[in-house]
Structures are given as structure tokens and as C-alpha cells.
Image (cartoon, rainbow, N blue to C red):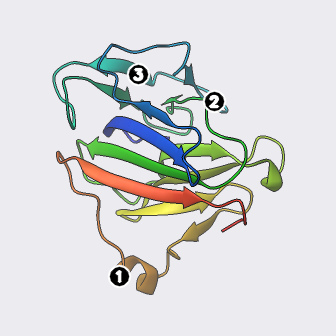
Amino acid sequence: MFSKPSLLALAALAPLTITAQVSEGFENGWDKTAWPIYATDCNQGGKVSLDTTTAHTGKNSIRVDGAGGFCGHIFVGTTKVPTSGDVFVRTYLKVSKPLTDSHITLITMPDPTLGTNKHLRIGGQSKILMYNRESDDATLPDLSPQGIATSKALPTNAWTCFEYRLGSDGM
């Protein structure tokens, strides 16, 4: 879900063994078959577009504009992610407005170990970037005063490199 911040993202995914790699800078345009639009539960007005006015490198990026509210979310993604081994993700993102106390989702990943249609999410709440598990709404960092105090706000109007690992060991 987005509370009307704009997200511009370029994504690159690679497993630990580097036997397969998904890398997309959208320099040749947007292949909507390889990178379709989707909304996991509902969509009431979010939009995705190829942005030729700004990019982390090159000339293009994908722009995602949420419509606000619970169903104002929309995503763009790929199913070409390796299904075994560790997966490393690097994305460059840029938000146009500071994160607020409201919950937003920037990245969502299905996790069948959590149940049907349950996701791991990366987004913001309490003005900080955080991970969130949909099944029980657990967050990392903890949204306590101590967890928030040890976190940093996501800068606005600046490209930020965000990397994470999805381990085959569950870590």
C-alpha cells in the first residue's frame, strides 16, 4: 500500500551460485510480459509507468504511484526469481515524500510457508523503513520507541540502494 509517495525502482536479482540472474534496467523499455502489474488483494487507483525523466543509471526507470488507503496499492514484479538456493536482491528506489506514521508497502514477496496468499513485505511505518510479515504483522525493527530510535528514515528525492538476501535456510 502506498500513501501517495512515488516509488521509482530498478531491480536486479541473483542467486548465490550465480547460475541464473535476473537483471533489468528497463533501458529497452518495459516488457510487461516479463514484468507485469499486479495487486495482491485489491487495486483502487494505483498506477505503474515507464519513467523516461529519471533513473538511477541510464535513462529509464519504473515509476509506481500508489493511490492511498488500504486498496491503493499496486506493484510490478517478475516470476523469474530462482526457486532454489539463496536469492540476493538489489533495488534502487526513490521516494518523493518522507515516510509517515502510516503503513506503506514498497516490496512484497509471496511466502507459502506463512499460508495461502501471505507475504513478506518491505515498506515503511512510523517514519522508518522496515520489514513486515503479513501473517502476524511482526516487524523488523520492532516498532517500539527503541526500535524506531535505532532506525533511519528513507531519504526523499534521492536514489537509495536497498539490498537483502532471502536464504534457503530460512534466514
Nearest to N terminus: mark 3 or mark 2:
3
Residue 83 left/right relative to 42: right
Q: Quadrant of the C terminus?
A: bottom right
Kindly state the secondary structure of the residue where label 1 is placed. Answer: helix
* Chain-order first, disc 1 or disc 2: 2
Front position among marks 3 and 2: 2
The image position of residue 83, as x and y in percent, is: 72, 42
The answer to which image quadrant residue 40 occupies is top right
Q: Amino acid at mark 1?
A: Ala
Could you tell me residue 1's position as x and y percent?
Answer: 50, 41
Q: Nearer the viewer, residue 65 or 34?
A: 34
Q: Amino acid at mark 3?
A: Val
Q: Position of residue 89 (x, y in %)?
A: 48, 49
Report x, y in % for residue 61: 29, 27
Measure the C-alpha gap from mark 1 to mark 2: 36 Å
| In this rendering, position of residue 133 left or right of residue 163 | right
Q: CA distance from mark 3 to mark 1?
A: 33 Å
Tell me the residue that label 2 is attached to: 79
Q: What residue is drawn where x is 68% and y is 54%? A: 134
* Residue beneath disc 3: 48
Nearer the observer, 160 or 135:
160
- The residue that label 1 is drawn on is 149
